[in-house]
Image: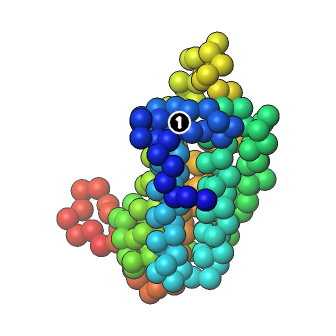
Amino acid sequence: MKIYTRRGDDGTTGLFAGSAVGKESSRIEVLGDLDELNSVIGTALSFGAEPTVADDLARIQRDLFRLGAEVASLDPVRAGTATLSESDVERLEREIDRREEELEPLRAFILPGGSPGGAMLHLARSVARRAERSLVALAGEVRRASSDPAAGAPIRPVTLAYLNRLADHLFVAARRQNLADGRDETRWLPGSETNG
């Protein structure tokens, strides 16, 4: 398989099953955000994530490929790419609950940072929120254009729930990674000049 095809030189790109859209489209925006998120998670892993965090992140990277395949399909159910399910969301929730038991309860806002791996997971969380906003925007566009088959099938609610829960998961993963790396969290309290 060649890396370059020249097919995108005209400003369009192919979707699953052969449809083409402009590279500026909302669907491609979502795919770009998912790709960036997966890359940031990969960077966090390269810093030597704590083993249970690393296991969760490796599974999440595969989930993001599945989600990308769904977004790249105008009719994911027919194409067989609608593979994320409520059980994937529930798995994230169980992992969040497990992590929170390992961490000191939150009593203040936490400033992003800490160890390189922890800081990268905070960045991943913010990219996940952007991907979520992009997917919500795409869902709205598809809903408003429901009479146009070129807009695609409605965005499944489980995909929105997955990204919403994923951002929470990455937040607690960042906290867990900082704990494993022996890095204190920097608290932010409104109105306090001695935050820390």
Q: Label 1 belongs to which residue?
A: 27
In the rendered image, residue 111, in percent from the top left (x then y), is placed at: 35, 65
In the rendered image, residue 73, in percent from the top left (x then y), is placed at: 66, 37
Residue 50 appears left or right of 118:
right
Residue type, label 1: Arg
Number of marks in picture? 1
The N terminus appears in which quarter of the rendering? bottom right
Q: Residue at x 60, y 69 (%)?
A: 57
Are there few (<14), some (14-19), or many (20+) residues within 10 Å of tag 1?
A: many
Q: How is the image coloured?
A: rainbow
Element assignment for label 1: helix
Q: Is residue 158 visible?
A: yes
Closest to the observer, 1 or 78:
1
Q: On screen, 193 above or below 147? A: below
In the rendered image, residue 38, in percent from the top left (x then y), is placed at: 53, 60
Q: Residue at x 37, y 65 (%)?
A: 112
Q: Quadrant of residue 144?
A: top right
Q: On screen, 124 above or below 67? A: below
In the rendered image, residue 158, in percent from the top left (x then y), is placed at: 70, 42
Q: Is residue 73 visible?
A: no
